[in-house]
Image: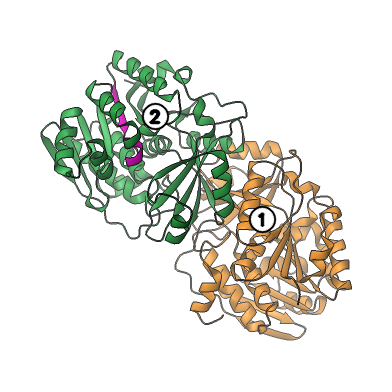
Chain colours: A green, B orange
C-alpha cells in the first residue's frame, strides 16, 4: 500500500482571471489559447490594461493534484511559492483540498507566480505567466519519501521553462523508478513543445516517462507534422501509454498499437476552458491509480474536464467524487 | 457639471469565497447571513477550516462604486488598503472598473482587510471580516475636492466599526452639504444597526444623511420593532428619502408619506447573494444622479442586484449598462 496515488510537480501559480474580447488579445500581442511567458515589466503592463479580475489558485500540475484529491484520491504536490499573500492563498487552497504540500516557500523574492488569464467569448483562455518564485524550484525540493510512496509522479512540460526544475524531475524519476513507480508528464502547450521538443522526446524514448498526456496540437508539434494519425502512431512507439485529448471530440488512449476512443461529455456552456487538460489528467490518473480500465480512466478524465470548463477558474468547485457516482463511473 | 455622480466610502476588503454546508456554519459559531467581525487569530482559525476558495475584490461601498461605474456612471471611492498583494488586487480591480481611487495605502501593517465569505446551498452568504488596514481610515483620507464634486457621497454603516472612519464621514458630510451635495448611507447589517442604532438615528435626524438604504431586517432593527409598516413610517419621517429592500419581494422607496413599490427581477438561480444590497444601491444611485424617476432608480437597483446574485462574487462580471439597455431601462 502506497501513501499517495499521485504526486504532481509543477509551477505553483495563482491565476488572475478576467474576460476580454478578441480585439484585446490582438491589440496586446497575446498568442490566443497559449501560455505566454512574461517578465515582471510585461506583467505590470498587462495588469494595468486588464479589467476587474477574480483570483484562484492554479498551476497546471497543481490543478491536477487538486482534481485527484477532489475525486477522493491521495495526492501530493511539489511547487515553489514565496512567503507572501498569494503564496498563502495557493498553499491554503491546495491543502484545503487535502493535497500534501510541504515545499518550503521562498523567503520573499521573487514573489509568488501569477498568470493573467484572459477568457474570450468562446471560453478560450490565453495565459500570461510571470514565473516569480517558481524559478527557484530545484532538486533540493524533492521529498524522496513522497516520490517513493506515490504510484505515479506526474509533472508539467512547463517545468522546462524555469532553470532548475528539470533537475528536480530527473531526481524524481530516479527515485520513482528505483521504487518501481511510474512517471508521467503532460506536454503542456504546443509552444512549450516547440521550445523543448528534443528534450521531451528524449524523456519519452529513454523511458524517463511512462505515461504522456497531450492535446492534439501538442502531439502534432512534438512530431512536427500536420498528420494526426502519424503523431498517434509515433507517440504509441515512444512511450508505454499516452492519452491525447481532442477538445469536444473526446480523447484517444494509445497503448502501443492499441487505441481506445473516449467521448467528451456534453457541456451546457463553455464558460472558461482553463484547467480542462489538467482535470482530464486528474480524472485519468485517479482512475489509473485506483485500478480502473483505461476506457474508464479516459471517461473520468472527460467528466472532470467537462465540469471545469462549465465554470470560471481551473479547479472544480463541486465534488468530482459525487459527480463520478452520479454518472455511475465511481 | 460635477466631476462625479457618486463617491462611496467604505472598508476596502478582498473577499475570500468558498462554499460550505449549514453544518459548517453552525459548528464554527458563524452567524448565518450576517457580517461577523473577527480578529487576526480567529481569521487564521477559520481560514484553516475553510475549503478551497476564490478571491474577489469586495467591500460593500467598493462594490457600489464599481456598480455605478459599470452602469456608466462617474464614481469615486475612499477606502484604506495596505501596500501588499491583496491591496494591489483591490486597487487594480476598482480602478480597472473606472473608479477614481487614490486613498493612500497603509505602509505594510496591518495588512489589507479580507472577509471570508461562506456561501451555503441556498445562496446565502455569511461573512467573517478581518478589518486589517481599514482601522486606519480617517479624516486625513478625505479628498475634499472629490466630495465637493460628487452629486452624492454614500457610505456604509460598517464604517462605525473602525475607530476613526466616522470622523472621515462627518468631514465628508460637512463638505458635501457646504457644496449643496447629498449624503447617503446604507445601514449595512442588522447586527451593525444594533451596535450603532443611536448614532445612525442621529445621523438621519440631524440631516447629516439625506438618503438611507436598508433591508427589511435592518429597518426593523433600527426601530426595534417587528412591525415593518411602523418601520417604514418612521424611516419616512427620519430622512428625506429611503429605499428598503425585501429580497425576492423587491423594494419600497419611501419619500415622506409617499411610497413606491418596485418588483425584484426574475432570477434563474440564486448562486451567491454577496453584493445584492450593494448593487441595489449602485443601480439606484446611478439612476438618481442621472435624473431618473424614483421608480426607475428602484428598477435599476433591482436589475443590478438580480444580476449579481446569479454569479459568484460581489461585482457583476457583465456590463450593467448593456443589461440596462437590454431591458429598456437605459
- Residue A24, compared with residue A111, is above or below; it is below
Residue A61 is marked as none
Q: Picture coordinates of residue A8 (x, y %)?
A: 39, 29
Q: Picture coordinates of residue B239 (x, y %)?
A: 80, 76
Q: Picture coordinates of residue B252 (x, y %)?
A: 66, 78
- Local crowd size for mark 2, using a 10 Å CA cut-off: few (<14), some (14–19), many (≥20): some
Q: Dot 1 lies on which element?
A: loop
The answer to whether residue A190 is magenta is yes
Name the image quarter holding residue B204. bottom right
Q: Picture coordinates of residue A321 (x, y %)?
A: 35, 42
Q: Which residue is mark 2?
A: A160
Residue drawn 71% across the image and 42% down it:
B83
Subunit bearing disc 1: B
Q: Which residue is mark 1?
A: B59
In the picture as drawn, the residue positioned furthest to the left comes out as A257
Residue drawn 16% across the image and 33% down it:
A234
User: Relative to B279, is B123 on the left or the right?
Assistant: left
Q: Quadrant of the N terminus of chain A?
A: top left
User: Relative to A292, is A13 on the left or the right?
Assistant: right
Q: Nearer the viewer, mark 1 or mark 2?
A: 2
Subunit bearing disc 2: A
Q: Is residue B317 visible?
A: yes
Q: Is residue A317 visible?
A: no
* Residue numbers of the magenta segment: A182-193
In the picture as drawn, the residue positioned furthest to the top comes out as A178
Amino acid at each position: 500500500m502506497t501513501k499517495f496515488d499521485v504526486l504532481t510537480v509543477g509551477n505553483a501559480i495563482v491565476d488572475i482571471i478576467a474576460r476580454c474580447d478578441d480585439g484585446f488579445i490582438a491589440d496586446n500581442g497575446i498568442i490566443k489559447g497559449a501560455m505566454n511567458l512574461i517578465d515582471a515589466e510585461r506583467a505590470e503592463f498587462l495588469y494595468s490594461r486588464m479589467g476587474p479580475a477574480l483570483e484562484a489558485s492554479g498551476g497546471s500540475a497543481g490543478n491536477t493534484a487538486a482534481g485527484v484529491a477532489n475525486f477522493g484520491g491521495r495526492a501530493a504536490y511539489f511547487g515553489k511559492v514565496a512567503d507572501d499573500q498569494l503564496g498563502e492563498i495557493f498553499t491554503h487552497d491546495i491543502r484545503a483540498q487535502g493535497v500534501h504540500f510541504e515545499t518550503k516557500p521562498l523567503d520573499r523574492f521573487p514573489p509568488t507566480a501569477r498568470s493573467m488569464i484572459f477568457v474570450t467569448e468562446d471560453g478560450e483562455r490565453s495565459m500570461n505567466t510571470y514565473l516569480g518564485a517558481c524559478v527557484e524550484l530545484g532538486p533540493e525540493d524533492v521529498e524522496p519519501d513522497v516520490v517513493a510512496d506515490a504510484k505515479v509522479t506526474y509533472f508539467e512540460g512547463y517545468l522546462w521553462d524555469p532553470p532548475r526544475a528539470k533537475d528536480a524531475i530527473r531526481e524524481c524519476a530516479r527515485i520513482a523508478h528505483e521504487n518501481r513507480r511510474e512517471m508521467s508528464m503532460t506536454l503542456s502547450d504546443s509552444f512549450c513543445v516547440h521550445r523543448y521538443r528534443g528534450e521531451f522526446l528524449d524523456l519519452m524514448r529513454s523511458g524517463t516517462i511512462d505515461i504522456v498526456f497531450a492535446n492534439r496540437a501538442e502531439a502534432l508539434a512534438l512530431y512536427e507534422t500536420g498528420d494526426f494519425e502519424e503523431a498517434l502512431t509515433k507517440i504509441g512507439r515512444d512511450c508505454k501509454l499516452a492519452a491525447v485529448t481532442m477538445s469536444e471530440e473526446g480523447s484517444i488512449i494509445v497503448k502501443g498499437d492499441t487505441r481506445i476512443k473516449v467521448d467528451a461529455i456534453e457541456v451546457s456552456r463553455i464558460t472558461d476552458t482553463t484547467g480542462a487538460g489538467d482535470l482530464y489528467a486528474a480524472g485519468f490518473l485517479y482512475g489509473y491509480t485506483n485500478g480502473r480500465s483505461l476506457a474508464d480512466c479516459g471517461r473520468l478524465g472527460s467528466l472532470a474536464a467537462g465540469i471545469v470548463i462549465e465554470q470560471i477558474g481551473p479547479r472544480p468547485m463541486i465534488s468530482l467524487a459525487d459527480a463520478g457516482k452520479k454518472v455511475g463511473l465511481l
